[in-house]
Structures are given as structure tokens and as C-alpha cells.
Image: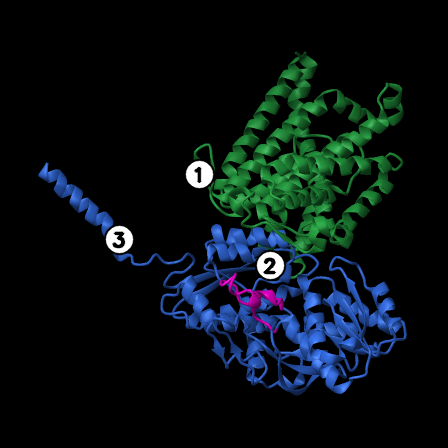
Chain colours: A blue, B green
Amino acid sequence: MPRFFLIATAALLVLGIPVAFGGTTSDPGITSTSIHIGGTAPLTGVAQGFRSVAEGANAYFKYVNARGGVNGRKINYEYEDDQYIPSETVRATRDLVENKDVFAIFNSLGTEQNEAIRPYLNQKQVPQLFVATGGTEFGRDYKQYPWTIAYQPTYISEGTMYGTYIRRTMPRAKIAVLYQNDSYGNDLIAGLQRGLGARKGNIVSKVGYSATDDNVQSEIAQLRASKAGILMLFATPKFVIQAYQYVNGLGWKPKIFNNAVSSASNVMVLSSSRGQNKRVEGSISIVFLKDPNDPKWKRDPAVLLYRKIMKRYNRNGNIKDVYNLYGMSAAFTFVDALKHAGKSPTRASLMRAATHLSERNNPFVLPGMTIRTAANDHYPMDQARLQRWHNGRWISFGGLLKARSQ
Amino acid sequence: MSRLAVARTIAAALAFAASIAFILIAPHWDKVGDIKGAQMGTYFIAIVGLNIVTGYTGQISLAQGAFMAIGGYTTAFLVTHGVRDLWTIPVAALVAGVFGFLLGIPALRLSGLYLALVTFGLAVAMPDLIAWDKLSSVTKGGQSIQLFGSKHLLGQGFNDVTVLGHTTSFNRAVYYLTWAIALVLFLVAWLLLRGGPGRAFRAVRDSEVAAASSGVHIAAHKTLAFAIGAAYAGVAGSLLVIAVAFADPQSFPAKLSLTILVGAVIAGLGSMWGVLLGAAFVEFLPVVSVHISKSQGVPDAIYGAALILIVLLLPAGVAGLLKRAASPLTTRLYTRS
């Protein structure tokens, strides 16, 4: 009998040691040499133009890995195709979390898409980091969804910047608005009205379209009938390109404001039919990243780094595609957060780091911008500059603007 | 029973057993898994439904994705109003079936290309119809409907589910639910098609004049086929919404209807043998083509090329291939008997 107890005790000890000394069980997706993160992007389908967001980020992670990774850990970024269909985003994200054991979801693209996965990720306590959308809710709802954090300036703050500028420089001009009839378009309008303040009555016509529409020809004709002097384009690239064509075709000559979603210089060049369409000249938008096509940044170290990374790690990518640089900027911020998440990061410590950022050294954003977050501030970017399209390129003007995110 | 009939029955039993074995193994195989496997199941159901309309009755329909949307939104609406998700599935079938019947009425006057255009019009319009503000009390006017965490949902959309004392993960529960329903619906379709209605459907397809002169009520059978096909799609849409605990118009794009048609053509129209492979094809070819190359445009090109190749090599789909492979054997049996 004593021998039985001896053996039993020994067995218990042996079995018990790993439990006792294993300490806190570590989160999935992380080892001492690697961290596995996931995300979704439209690699095929209607919105595949945005695919370069994920490709740019992936190229930056490869660059970081080649230089030893973060605290000895290589970043393995697995991005799945969701075809820009929210139910596919849900499926792909569940697969990444439950079957591929990712540590965090990073920079998934699209407003509806991120809304679809937000309750799930928060329920599972998986960080939903730096979403690739300006939807206000991702920063605003941090009490209900503490595992979610936004990234770029919100659509409300962008609208506010336009409204303030119009109120100051063209207080009497009548305004017509083309907008996508969802939370993205409505946020931009809400911001515009806030920026206009007492002048919000200057908005004489608002016409919405649906994201699944084919074209906005009748919408533009309707707006033109308002005889407004300013046209706001709160629309995605395809519809912005169409809008410029229809405005020109109707012989309408409004001052055009084009939202940042569609203001990439490659989109503008398309809109202007390579300089043929004069309505594009003088358009105004906001900017928060360094445009690699802008001669001003030609010798800037960040753009030189961008070109180097593109050539080495994203050889098939289009170097003129600004969305690559957007992805790199988000990847830089992720690496920054990971560095501050401790020697052996947990999901909670990474989330804590992401919500306590004070990033002044992100090379890809405009000089002087700070990416700052706090426990009660889940909006990393809230600054931007205005820019005007002139002779085939964007020229920024005025200082850095700051607008409330919600 | 002739030897041919015996051989056919044995072959059917073997194929059915192999399919069951595949369905039981698939979730444990990491290339398939629960999530993709369940999606394959919803495609399977929609393809069986389309096969009844297009394959057996000869009425081309490009609206199967639109009926999935109707089924999906029926489930989303009912769950948000406190109905248990499982009970919404038959309701979704009924609602979609009624809409299918209604679409079947104009379809009586149209055929071929014109019918394809009308049904495709419905598929194209469906996301906009959902977003139509007059319907916003039902569809939330195009805003997404989040069901996650609802206590009327299987495992609230994420929790482990316990059935008859067995506890399993949410994703696997959805997988088994989808395939259990898929198999029941498959057997129902099989029984229906080998009986009187099936013969009438085929008669309508092969020659309306001959069918009418044999006493087949053409209009009744065409609308019936549309209603049944749409009801199947309704179930598929309902299961799709339950699986992701989320509904929105973009999840039912016009492309979904094309995907189902592609699946039915690959499976082989007018035959039930290839449906599983047709469903596997539409679920996994996009995954495989993205896996081959993520470069811009390449996955779409691979998808297109594979489709062209298969239609050229297998004009009658997988079912045709199986029939050809089996024919030397069955012909010999036939000539001997």
C-alpha cells in the first residue's frame, strides 16, 4: 500500500509540475520566435483594387522579419480573400481564429465587413486592430467593444474639415452632395454639416446611391439641377470616376471636393482621362499619408524606403498604387504596438499597447502627425491636411488640421 | 427487377455511402473543415433545388441567389423577433417557395434566353430591393442585421452546442445541421423526381406538346418546379445566415446566382449523381485559385480557365462522366438480360 501511495504521489507531482510552473497559459498564435496574425481583404471581386492594402502591409512585415522581427519574433501575416462580401469576412475570420489560431486580426478592410466580425472578435477577446475603414463606430464604441481599435481619420472628421474650409472660404456657395447611402456616406455628411455650422443651410441638394448600383448618371443630373457651385463626392473610386465624367458631359462646372477614399492619385489620373477632363483640375481632398507619386516626397526617406520594400518584397505590386503605402503605415503601427506589448505579449497586453500609442516616428504619415491613443481614445489618427489637384498631382496646402473624430 | 435496375440500385447505394463517408470525414480534414464544409452544404442544397427547375423541368433560372436572400432575411427577421433559429428554416423555405411560385407565373410565358434574363434581373435587383426603404421594417433598409449573441440562435452564434448529450463546437454543429438537412432534402428530391412529378417535369422539359397531349398540366408543373427550387434556395439562405449570425444585402450578390448555376452545370443538369462534386467545385475552386497565386487578376483567370476546361471536357458535368465511366459495365448487363 505505501508503495502505491509513493508511486501515486510521484505521478501526481510529475503531472502537476507543468501545470504549476507553466504560469499563465499563453495565448494562441505566439511562440518565442513567431507571431501569427490574420486579416481579410478583397483579393478578388468588385473591390479588388483595395487588395494592395494587405499586400503593402505584408511586404512591410517581410522587411521587418528580414531584419530580425520584433523581439526575436517573425510576423506571419495570413490574409484571406473575402471578395468584399461581409458573410465571407465572417467565415474567413472564424477560420483564422478557430482553425489557424491567429493571435490577432489586423487591418481587415471595409466598414460593413468589420462591423460583421466585431461582436465575434470581442466575444472571443481577440484584438481587432487598426481596421481599414474610417467608420466612426470602431473608435466610438470602445466601451462596448474594448478589443476593437480604429486607424485612419474618421469620415466624420474628414467631413468636418471640408465643412470648416467651405464656411471660411466660400460662405455663400450652394452645395450639392453625392453620397453612398450607408453609414460611410452619412458620416461624411454629418461631419460636413458640423463643419459648416450656421452655414449648413447652404447644402441645397443631397442625392444618395447604393453601393450595389451600376452608375450614378441620374444622380449627377439631379444634383446639377440644384445649380450648386460646390459638389461633394462622398463615394468610392468607381463612382467618383463616373461622376467626373458625367459632370463634364453635362457642362457643369462646380468646385469639386472628393473624399479621401477615392483621392489616391492613380484614381485621379483615371478620372481626368489622362488630363482630358478639366473638371478634375482644382479638386480638393484631404491627405494623411505621403503620396509616393508626389515629386515633393521623391527624396523623402520614407518614400525611398517604400520603393525599396516594394521592389524587394512586393515585386508584382504596382508601385504607384498608394494603397500599398497605406498598408505599410498600418503595419508600422502594428509593429510599434507589438514592441510595446512586453517581452512575451498576450492578447491583452497587445491591446493595452495599441490603446496607449504615442507614435511620432511613423515615416509614412505626414510630417508632424502623431498617432496617439488612450484607454478612452480608440482613434489613432485625427489629423490631416487639405490638398488641391493641380496639373496632374496633389499639392497640399494649409497646416495640419485636427477635427473631432465623432 | 432487371439486372440493370439492380446494378443501378447498387451503384446508387455505394455512391450514397461514399458521400456519407466523405461528409463524416470532411470536417476533420484540415483542407475542408467545418466552416468551408458547411458552406459547401448550403451550395449543395441550392444546387439540388436549381437542378429540379433547370435540370429536370428545363426552365433556366438565374435567380437562385435571390431566393437564398429571401430565405436568409426571413430567418434574420424571425430570429430578431424572438423565433428559435431552427423553426425559421421551414418558414424560410415556405416564404421563398411562395416567391418562387410567383416568379413561375411570368415564366410560363417566357422560355430560354428571355427567362434567363428575367430571372437574372431579379438576382441583380435583389440587393437593392433589400435596401429599399419601403421594406426597412423587415430588412432594416440595407443596414446589416447582426444576430450574434442572440439567445434564439444555435449556441448564440459562437458557444458550444449540446445535442443529445454530445457537446460540439458551434462551427461543427452548423456543419452537421447543414448536412443533415441537405441529405433529407436530397432524398426528398430523389423520391420526388423518380415518381410521378419527376416524370411530368422531364416530359415538360423534353417536349411541352407531347407532355400536354399526355395529360400533363404544363403550367402547374412549371410553377411547382419553380416553387420547389426556390424553397430549397430559401433553406440554403437560412442556413447561410445562421452560420455567420449576420445578414446584409452584399452577402447575396447577383454573382451568387451565377455561382449556383455553375455548380449545377458542373454537377450535371438533369442528374443527381454529381451534386456533391458540383458543390465542392464552387466552394473550393476560388480557394484553390487564390492559393495558387494571390497576384492581381490571376485567381479570377484561373477560375475562368478551369471552368472553360471542365465544360469542354465534361459537357454533361460530373454526372455525365460517371455515367460514361459506368456505361461499359451497365451496357453489358443490359445486353445480357
Q: Nearer the viewer, residue B331 or B201?
A: B201
| Residue, disc 2 | A115
Residue A306 percent across, percent down from the top left: 57, 76
**Is residue A265 visible in the rendered structure shown here?**
no
Front position among marks 3 and 2: 2
Between residues A178 and A59, which one lies in front from this camera angle? Answer: A178
Label ID, residue A230: none
Task: Respond whether the residues carrying marks 1 and 2 are from the same subunit.
Answer: no
Q: Is residue A138 magenta?
A: yes
Residue contact at pointers 1 and 3, CB within 8 angstroms? no
Residue plotted at (73% across, 72% down)? A267
Can marks 1 and 3 be said to lie on one chain?
no
Disc marking residue A18: 3
Q: Magenta segment range?
A: A132-153
In the rendered view, tell whether residue A197 sits above or below residue A4. below
Question: Which sits in the foreground, A349 or A403?
Answer: A403
Q: Chain of mark 1?
A: B
Looking at the rendered structure, the kind of residue marked 1 is Thr
Residue for point 61% across, 68% down: A136
Nearer the observer, B127 or B74? B74
- Distance from the alpha carbon under mark 1 to that under mark 3: 28 Å
In the rendered structure, which amino acid carries the disc numbered 2?
Glu
Q: Quadrant of the N terminus of chain A?
A: top left
**Chain bearing mark 3:** A
The secondary element bearing badge 3 is classed as helix
For the residues labelled 1 and 2, the Cα–Cα distance comes to: 29 Å
Check disc 3 and give the amino acid type.
Pro
The residue that mark 1 highlights is B167
